[in-house]
Image (tube, rainbow, N blue to C red):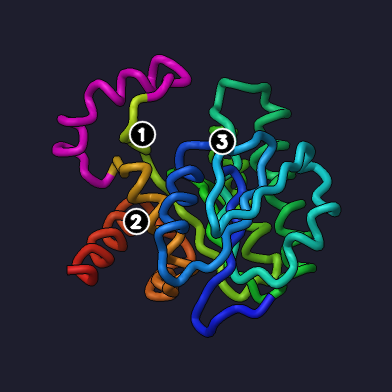
Amino acid sequence: MSIPAGQRRLVIVGATGMVGGYALRYAFDHPAVCRVTAIGRRSLGISHPKLKEILHKDFADCSALAEALSDQDAAIFCLGTYTGAVSDAELRKTTVDYTIEFARVLHGSSPDAAFSFLSGSGADPTGRSRMAFARYKGEAEKALLAAGFPHVYLFRPAYIYPVEPRQEPNFSYRLLRAIYPAFRVLFPNQVIRADDLACSMVEAVVSEAGQRGGPVFENRDIRAMVELLRRQRR
């Protein structure tokens, strides 16, 4: 398939999730994106001229994705789970093992691809954090930086505001959603809208916005990127 100059082919993993879903919609509307390959364990239930959907049940082995991942320009990896929703072993498998395995196959098929990774505030690549989530996200970050991709962007959002109504995973998220209007005023650098986060993850690899910073984007940096992108659109 011939790709016009300046056009990008993206892979989005986890597009059935909140941030991945916004990334998918943003990519559909982006004039520089010509094709989006969405890979996930559940069907999206939608169709779009730019979309190629691939169902893949077991991310512990991504070898079968090698052909689908060839000739890609970038990947946006949003696959994950909530702390407390699964066992510690499952949390590590999803956060670390799945990320590393996908990156291994992607790099083998598209070694020049850029990689946007949905990490989290407090991610600790040193492995010393007492929080399992922080250790596992840090371990995944460290592996991605060593995977050989020319550009890796690690996004570490704090509280991600869902924007659209949803079933919150636990009481903490229900509380944060309830107090969000005040929280965003008092602590603006501790919150980010899900759609803004998704926008920044896409733009980092499509317009090379990520090369102006990074590879680590803390919540403050993500907000700054979003504001810069808004100013550029005016």
Q: Residues within 10 Å of mark 1 (few under 14, many from 20)?
A: some
In the image, 107 versus 120, the foreground residue is: 107
User: Residue at 42% across / 73% down in the picture?
Assistant: 207
Disc nearer the start of the sequence (1/3): 3
In the image, 40 versus 179, the foreground residue is: 40
- Would you name the residue on which mark 3 appears? 133
User: Residue at 70% across / 72% down in the picture?
Assistant: 71
Secondary structure category for the residue under label 3: helix
CA–CA distance in space, label 2 to label 3: 20 Å
Disc nearer the start of the sequence (2/1): 1
* Residue 151 seen from this side: yes
Q: Is residue 217 above or below residue 183?
A: below
Find residue 21 and report its horizontal and vertical position in percent: 48, 43
Q: Nearer the viewer, mark 1 or mark 3?
A: 1
User: Residue at 25% across / 21% down in the picture?
Assistant: 178
In the image, 206 versus 1, the foreground residue is: 1
Which portion, as a residue range, is magenta?
A: 166-189
Find residue 110 and report its horizontal and vertical position in percent: 72, 71
Q: Is residue 63 above or below residue 167?
A: below
Q: Amino acid at mark 3?
A: Phe
CA–CA distance in space, label 1 to label 3: 20 Å
User: Residue at 17% across / 31% down in the picture?
Assistant: 181
Q: Quadrant of the C terminus?
A: bottom left
- Would you name the residue on which mark 2 appears? 222
Q: Is residue 149 magenta?
A: no
Disc nearer the start of the sequence (2/3): 3
- Would you name the residue on which mark 1 appears? 162
Q: Amino acid at mark 2?
A: Ile
Q: Nearer the viewer, mark 2 or mark 3?
A: 2
Q: Is residue 58 left or right of residue 210?
A: right
Task: Give the image quarter of residue 16.
Answer: top right
Find residue 210 and report its horizontal and vertical position in percent: 43, 69
